[in-house]
Structure formats: C-alpha cells, structure tokens
Image (cartoon, rainbow, N blue to C red):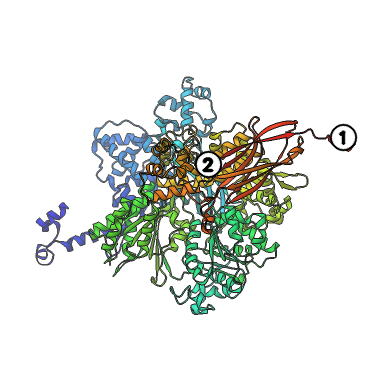
Amino acid sequence: SYLFVRMMKNPELYGANPDIMKEEDPTLEAYRRNLVHSAACLLEKSQLLRYDRRSGALQATPLGKVSSHFYISHESMATYNQHLKPTMSDIELLRLFSMSGEFQQIHVRDDEKLELAKLSQKVPIPVKESVEESSAKVNILLQAYISKLKLDGFALLADMCHVQQSAARIMRCLFEIAQKRGWAELARLTLNFSQMVSSKTWKSQSPLRQFKNVPEIVARKLERKDIEWDRYTDLTASDLGELVGVPKMGKTLHQLVSQFPRLELAASVQPITRSMLRVELTITPDFTWDVKVHDYAQLFHIMVEDCNQEQILHQEAFMLKMDGADSQHYVSFSVPVMSPLPPNYFIRVVSDRWLHSEAVIPISFKNLILPSKLPPPTQLLDLQPLPITALPNKGIQSLYAPFFKYFNPIQTQSFHSLFETDANTMVCAPAGSGKTICAEFAILRALSKNGKAKIVYVVSKSELVALQTKKWSDRFSKIGISVAKLTGDTVEDKKIMKSEVNIILAETSHFDNVSRLKVMTRVMASLALVVFDELHLLGSSDGPTLEIVVSRMRRIAVSEEAGMRFVGLSASLANAKDVAEWLGIKSANLFNFNPKVRPIPIEIYMQSFDIQNFSSRLLAMGKPVYNGIRRHCENGDGVKPALVFVPSRRQAQLTAIDLMSYATAEEGASGGFVRPGLEKALENILGTVKEPALGQTLAGGIGFMHSGMDVSDRKRVEGLFRDGVISVLVATQELCWGLDVESSFVAVLGTEAYDGKERRYADYPIADILQMMGKSGRPGIDRVAKAMILCFSPKKASLRKLLFEPLPIESHVDGYLHDTFTNEVCTKVIENQQEALDWLTWSFMYRRLTKNPVYYGLQGVSQQHLGEHLSDIVETVLGDLEESKMIELNEETGDCSGLNLGFIGSNYYLAYSTVELIAASVTAKTKTRGIIEIVSAASEFGVIPMRQGEERSLKILSRGLPYVKDVVWNDPNGKALVLLQSHFERKMMNSDLAQDRDFVIEGAVKIIQSVVDVIATNYHLKAAVAAMEVSQSVVQGMWKKDDVLKQIPHFTDELVEKAKAKGVTSPFDILEVEDNVREEILSGFGEDSVEMSEIAAFCNSYPSVGVAFDVVDSDEITNGDPFRVSVKLQRDADEDEEEEEEEEEEKGVVVSSRFPKKKLESWWVCLGDPKTDKLFAVKRTQLKEEAKLNLDAFAPEEPGTYDLKLYVICDSYFGVDQEFDVKIKVEEGEDESEEDE
C-alpha cells in the first residue's frame, strides 16, 4: 500500500520509532501487525468478524458480510448493534438512520436553518431533534426526497443527493440485519422504507404512484377515496374512470391495476417430527406481466412468522420469472414447531420492489396432531470385537480374512441375531457402517442350512445392484455360491428366478415386475431369505415401489405359510419400530443405532452461504472446499483422499479446475495432489484420457466424474483415486450410489440441483446426502472421518436436524396404488373392495396412519377416522380404474374384475395412465406419426431429467425432424419425442442426451408392444402393422423408408449405394455374393478389424425364417363361429455347421449397434383382411429354433370366400417380414332357434 511506502520513508510521522525500526524491525512488520491487531479488535467489537488472537485467524460473521456487501462503515454497524431493537417506530428508525457514520461530514450551515425548519413542518414523520443538529438535517432531507419537496439551496440539494444515494443501501442493510436476527416487524419496516426511497412514494399514498404514467391529480383523487387497495381488482375500467372523474383514464388505470404484482397463496402442512413441519407453499401469480414494467424477473421474500408476527422462523427468496408468470409455483421448506404449540403461523410473501405488493396466509394449528413420541435408539454395547473365526469354517472365513480379522462393533452386536437364529432382523446404522456384511451373515446362515437355498437381495438403486453383483460374484464364487441379477425383462427374469442360482440381486422395480405374476407365487414362497437394503428410501421417489414389494412378500410369506426370512437394512431411523413391526420383526431383533454411532467416528462441518444466485453461490464455495481439503487431509506423506460432490456435470469440471488453480497458486506447478513418486506413472496414463479438461486436472492430482463421461475415462479416474495416485475426486451427486471408493474427507458442495421439469432448484434427497457422507472414513486407516456440508443459509437449520438426528420416514404409497391394484385385481388377489381394504393393512402406510395422522390427511386417530380414510382411498382408486376401463366394478356388491386394458397394463408393467392414453389415442387411421407421438407421451417418460439450458440443445437437435411442430420444450415427454426421432435419424448428441435417449429406446419397446395389443382389441390391421414397423425403427435406429442395408453396423449412406451398385440389396446378399465382390464392397475395413467382425456378426444373425401354416378344419368354418390357424415358424440353420451350446444360447439375440442393451427377437404373427382393415388375430412369440402357435379368431358374419393375409413380422429387423395368402370359405351355420326345436 501507499501507506507502507510512506511509513518506510517517514516512520515518525506515522508513530513508529525510527531507532527500533533500524535495529529490530527494518520492514515495520511488528508495527504493521499492531495496526492489523488494532483494526481486528475494533471490528470484533462491532461483531463484523471473529478474531483468534492466538493464531491470528480472521473469520467473517454474517453481520460482517452484510456490512461488506452494502459498503457500510464499521462505525455505522456499531451504532446499529447498539440501537437496533426488534420493534421500532418510524420515528426511531429514521433517527437511527440519521446517526449512520456515512453522514458524519454533513453539517448544518447557518443559511440552511430557516429552510430546514420550513421543511420539518412539511414532512410527514415528526423530527424531534433541533434543526441545528446534523442528524435532524439528514432525517428531514430523506423525508423531503420521498415527498418530492422542492429545495431552494444548491448546497442543500447536494446534501439531499448524498442522503438519497446512501439511504437505499443503508435501509437494505438494516433489512438484512433484521432478517438475520429474525425480527419480523423491523424487517417489514426497513423493507418498506427501502421501497419508499426507490419509488419516492409514501406507504400511505396510492400504490399506483409507483407507475410512471399516473398524473399527480389522478393519484390525489384516488387517495381521497376511502377504498381499500385490495378492492381495486374488483372495479371495472368504467368504475375507475368514474372514481377519478376522468372517464378516459379508466382503461389506463384498469390496465395498471392488472399489472400490479399480486400473488395468491395456498399452503399445506405435514408434520415430519414433533419439532419440525414441512410446508408446501403454492404461489400463483395473479397479474398481467409487462416486460417494460416488470423487467424479466421479480424478486419476492418468503417469511414465516410466529403467531404474534414478531419472529421470523424461516425466510428465503423467491424469483418469479417472466416465462413462469402464467403458471403455479411450488416452494417446499421446513419450519420448527414452537413449544407449546401456538394457534397458528403466518406465511408472508413480500415483493422486493413494490410497496403494498404483499400476500399473507395463516396456517392454523387448531386441528394439528403431532406425531407420536419416538422410542430411543439402540445402545451400542461395549462388547469384545468378534473375530472372523466365529464363522463355522475356513471357506467362509476366507471371504473376510484378506480385509480384516475382527468384525466392527455394529456387526458384532447383531451377529447372534443374524447368523445364529432364523428370526427376522433389522439393522439401522449410518452409511459406511458395514451393514452389507450383516446381510452376508444371514445369507451364509441360509446357505449353511441348505446349500440349494434361494436368496433375493432387493435395493432401490440400480447402481447398488450392479456394484453388489460384481462384488459378490467375485467373492462368493470362491466358495461355490452362484450369483445373478434380474434384468427387467419379464421372460428372462422368470428363468433366473426358477434357476438354481443361490443369490439373486434385484432392483426394486425389476423384482416388483416378476413377483407380481400369479405364476411366480410359488417361486416367491420358496425363497429362504429376502434382504431389503436401504429401507430408508421408503421416503424417496422410489419408496412406493419398495413398499409395495415388501408388503407383497410379507403377505405371501403369511398366506402361503412359507418359512421365509426377512432382513432389513437401513440408515438410522426415527420410527424404526414401525418399520420393524411391518416386517414382522420383534424388538429384540431390531438394531436401530444412533446416527453418531459409526465404526469410524465422523466430524461434520456445516458452512452456509447467503448468496441468492445459485451459480455465484457455488463459485463462492470453491475456496472453502479447498481450505477444508488442506486443513483436514494434509499429512506427512502427501494428501489423504478427498471426495467432493457437486450438483451438475458442468460444475464438476469447473470445481476441479478451481481446486487445481488454488493448489497451483499455493504449491506451484505440482499442485500437491499427486502422490509423491507417482508423477511419471501418471504422465503415461494421461495420454489415454479422451476428455481434454480431465487430462489437465489429472496432471494436478484432481479427477472429476459425471454420468455422461466416456466409460473408459470414468473407470480410469475411479481407479486412480482408489489406488491413491490422485488425491481429489470431484463427482456429480447422482453418482453417489454407484461410486466404489472411500475417502478420508467428503465435501458436499451445495445441496440443491436444478429440476428442469419444475424450473427450479430442488433439494437433494436426504438419503443422497447420507450416502455421500457414508463415503467418508477408510476402515483400518482413518481414526476419524470428516465431512463438510456447504449449503444455502435458509436450508441449514433443517439440514442440521436431519443429518444429526435419526431420519423420520413416511409412506407415499397412497398416490401410487392404481397400478398395483390393477395388477392385484387382474391376478385375482383383490376381487372386491373389502379385499382391497385388507391389502392396504399389509402396507407401511397403515402402520403410520395413526402415528402421524395429519401427514396423511386424517382429522383424528379413531378407528372410524381410519376406516373412512382407507375406504376413501380404495373407492377413489377403484373408481379411477373403472373410469379408465382397466377393471370392471360392481358398485352394489363391490366386486371387481380385470378388463383387457388392465391385463395389458399388468402384463407390460405400465402405468394405468399410459394404457388409458393409448386406448384413447389409437384409431383405425393411426399411422407412424401417431404411434411415435403416443409412445413419447407415455407416463414412464415423465421421469426423464430436464437439465438447465437443455431446451436450446433440443431445439437444435429437432432441426429436420418431421414431427416436432407442437413440442413443449421443457416437458419430459416432448423431450422423449425429439430423442426418439433423433434416434431414427442417427443424430449425434451430447453424452447426457445420449443417456436419456437410451432410456427412451429401452422403454419404447414394451410400450409399442402394448400399443399393438390395444390396437388388436379394436381389430385395426393397418394401425397394428404400423406399430410393429415403429418397433423395428426403435431397435435399428432408422426410419422405415431407409434402405434395409443401413441396419448393418458401420454401413453409411455411401457404403449402401456402393453395395447396391454391386447388386447387394439385403444382408443375405452380403453372405451369398462372390468373395471378390464382398471384399470390394468392404474394402474400407481391415480383414481382421473390429468393424469387419461386427458386420459378420450381424449378417450371420440376420434371421431367415420358414413359415408353415394350416387352417384347421377348413371345411367346417361357419359364420360367426371360432376357427383356428396353426402356424409353425422354423429358423433356417446352416447345414455345414454344428453349432455349439454357447452359440445356441445366442440364437434369437438381436444384433444392433443402435440398441443399448441385450434384446431377444420377437415375432408377431397376424391374421387379417387388408381390404376391410380388420385384424382377426395376433400373437407374439420368441424364436430360437422353432415356434408353434395357434391363431384363434371368429369367422365373418356373412358366408362366402375370404382372401385373408397371414403376416409374420419381426419386432427387431427390417426386411425379414413375410406375408401369405390365406383363403377361408365360410358356410352358413345352423340357426340356434332351429336346433332348439
């Protein structure tokens, strides 16, 4: 600084001793240190920072951040600290404002006293001080500015300008201070004054003065009228014109009233615990948006106030954007419950800019019933650690010997219940506590009793299924235990469940799909053990499916009297006792440990940020994360591994670059995050990395990962971090379930992610944050695990409560019963309303209804309340299903039975809303476009994520696509429509969109199959064939109009033309053509190249099917009666080859470079009349060697000869469909009345 330069030149002038400077302090370091110490002490006294005198560390306080942001002097902040009170009048607030340090230089001149005295008589708020005091002058000038009073003196005008410029930021500063201290009344007052200064309008004046085009005379006339502002919206243009006596102004005034920001509020309350409520606030804009008046966004403040409107219990900002001005907005937050319970709270939503733009809604607690008190958690006993030799044989011991010699305290305490008894057991402990080994105890117990026992492990996350399958396959295969996982394909999964496999792992939805089948009931009843992992996900979006699966298995176990054992694993739960009772677990076998009980103790550091803008907030979190890594991870050998979770793919890259920049600035080129001695090894790996930015950050010892990254890069980064070559890994939050790594330190950078469907930032599920924290702590290495949570300030209190206390979970199954009831009615598990009520008693919801009634909408806990609530649910669900024609319901008896649409939905595991949409949309005239639009509109695609800024990418992607005229760009179904057509066009897209496209393609196949079945119920032939052809397009990624050669891998349009010029028109010709011609066509590929082998694999798999058919009893077909056509499909085999068993297994597997997963061929066999567009019969079958099937149909009503067609259509390949002529002669049948005679 210049101060330092001058101090060195002339130390005496600045109070430094020249003699001491020459001898002891030549650079004045001690003197400068004293200056800093004095300043720090002064700022600490003003509460602007925290000062540690021992270490010299300085840390900003919330008050200090406010002071810095609004550029307020420390003298002013000291004044505010001294004089601010929770309740202040206008007079007191203006007096405090005028005492601010910013106005120290304002003095009262002699020639101004007279004018100030006159002004003091005109301003509305009394000034008690003498006009000779400078504070009185500041007060008067501010009021004169708001009142638009004219001033005579130029000096006074200049002072007013200074006061006005400072007033806006000082009032904003006072508003922020009041908010942080939770003073509701003062916050409202300071915000009002801030708005008054910016609009030059008093609150007592007409709100229309805030518009520029309202004449003064009109505003005054409005102010004379005794009409409340809220009533202006009820007045017409002519009423307003008469009100001001200027009829021509009526239309203008009416327009201004309609443009005034006004919101309608609705709120619902759900108790989470006895001390916390979740509030769902619905905000509906009720005004006309004009960009000239409102700009592109309007800021509002949401404040929850106590019953006296004195204390702010929660506050957050809400940004209303122009494109959301016509839609409802949902804000969810948690507020504490005061004790004793108050009569009500108030939710106030106030505009940041507009006076009088305010909406208030009371939340009454008159009928609020708080949840019942929760039992205490299980105490962790001080037991001797159990050695692995407690297991019965060395084979089992060998599973654990390479990793540890003793089980941890949680495993030790639960060992007896899990391994030495057959009792249902539940273990609840934080992530990273070794609960999976607890499950292995029960698995080994079951297999030691019966070597052929079948065990199912169910978890809601597909990432965990894949991870656990790999781990158990590697480990259990050593002792002869077989492991498999369900695929989601019904036929394949039925085979797996009926096989001799010991351990079957399943994602919840896949297990639901197979366990719901009637034919699988006995298989389910024969299971020895079912392990339900991550049961705390009952409260997440996957929870309803998990609850339905658990309820079904419990019902099967009891009704079939099966000796099935249940083991539940979960994070620490507040209401674990209810979950245990639901699973049939006795209290002695429930181990619900406190969240603080971990094998490796964890230290959690929480840091909050006030910055409203999401991107800026994440940017501000970068440096604290870097400091956290340095503080908690540095040791003598380098840096301990640190894992950082971020909200998005872009942020993963940015955070990695930021951390590298901080490290480079501090440590030099090395960065300090590469393990010493491994720099050269890392350099060799960098050349294989495909993503340029990743290569740069890896050189500094920092990797980043996201779901859209190339698989090889992702595995390489994960391996480098696991092996300790790099010390820092930045990953997106969605990867927290699939990461197979451990670290010493975990940082969660932000706890919100963008939800494109609702166009807002939504909180992470609490289960995700617990899973992230579970990655902290390496068993056997770290003594203490450390986690750092960086979050938005309004979220901190509720997050702290959820992270430090057991997790409360509630059921959400009541909103997801339609599809389950459809299946249960179709499988005859439910045959009347009473059985539907009985079914509900197996659910977790049934156990929670009386424990937390308000959460579920109950007004009481009596048996009458409970019965009425359950009856309402059943009647509503069955009524909806009847209306959708999924089931038939007899309202008098309550009996119900499945209809055709219900069986279709149940068979294909589709939402009832999807089947209803298909049935309502398909007609005889439905063609390719209609099929594609119906498939894209399926409810199953409503879960596709909408990322920020993705609308632009979709619009670019949609160029040239035929069916995108009416696409809603921010809608998941609109996105599915674009992605499906882009797939047919084979367009390139970024990794995130490619991932979403694969999801759409996988789901589209079964939806198209259901479309064919629905069309078949209406007997439309052409529409059914169109749907079958769309299925071929989905699997091969091309349009029907494209050349069939385009199916062959690596065949471009140029190569197709080249092949056609040589007479090759189908994949069969590639094999049959002369060798020299084939070599010329494929000259662009090496003889032993991967491309050539993929082309050969496709051509060898391209199906050639022989068809034989016969009309059974063709001479005896009579009008209106059933007749049968028997069909035999035979795959043509290569006579020269004897195929091995392995190749036999591969028969029927589709070869497609465009389909993302393994798929088996299906063939539709249809009988129809193309002249009348009537479909007589259709069946779908899979084909390996041969398939026999019968088509049963009803003959036409009119006797005569009919030329029908038999269609054999593949669902996966173009160019292999066949059609045959089928002639039937229909005779006149005998009349039933004649027969009776």
Name the secondary structure under disc 1. Answer: helix
Tag 2, which secondary structure? Answer: helix
**Would residue 140 be visible to someone looking at this image?**
yes
> In the rendering, at what x and y percent does residue 666 appear?
24, 59
The crowd level at tag 2 (other Cα within 10 Å; few <14, some 14-19, many 20+) is many
Residue 938 placed where, x, y %?
A: 56, 42
Position of 1228 with respect to 1055 (left or right) is right
| Residue 1093 percent location from the top left of the image | 42, 50
Give percent across and percent down for residue 514. Answer: 61, 55
Q: Nearer the viewer, residue 731 or 1207?
A: 1207
Q: Which one is in front, 1181 or 964?
A: 1181
Residue at x 65%, y 42% (from the top left corner): 1109
Which label belongs to residue 399?
A: none
- Point out the residue furthest to the right here: 1237
- From the viewer's side, name the closer residue of 198 and 1105: 1105
Name the one closer to the observer, 554 or 681. 681
Tag 2 or tag 1, which sits nearer the N-term? 2
- In this rendering, position of residue 340 left or right of residue 679: right
Residue 411 lies, with reference to residue 158, above or below; the image says: below
> How far is the residue under mark 1 from the one under mark 2?
51 Å
Read off the residue under disc 2: 1032
Quadrant in the picture for residue 882:
top right
Q: What residue type is labelled 1?
A: Glu
The C terminus: image quadrant: top right
Q: Which amino acid does label 2 sit on?
A: Gln
> Is residue 60 in view from this perspective?
no
Query: In the image, 586: left or right of 672?
Result: right
Q: Name the disc covering residue 1234, or none.
A: 1
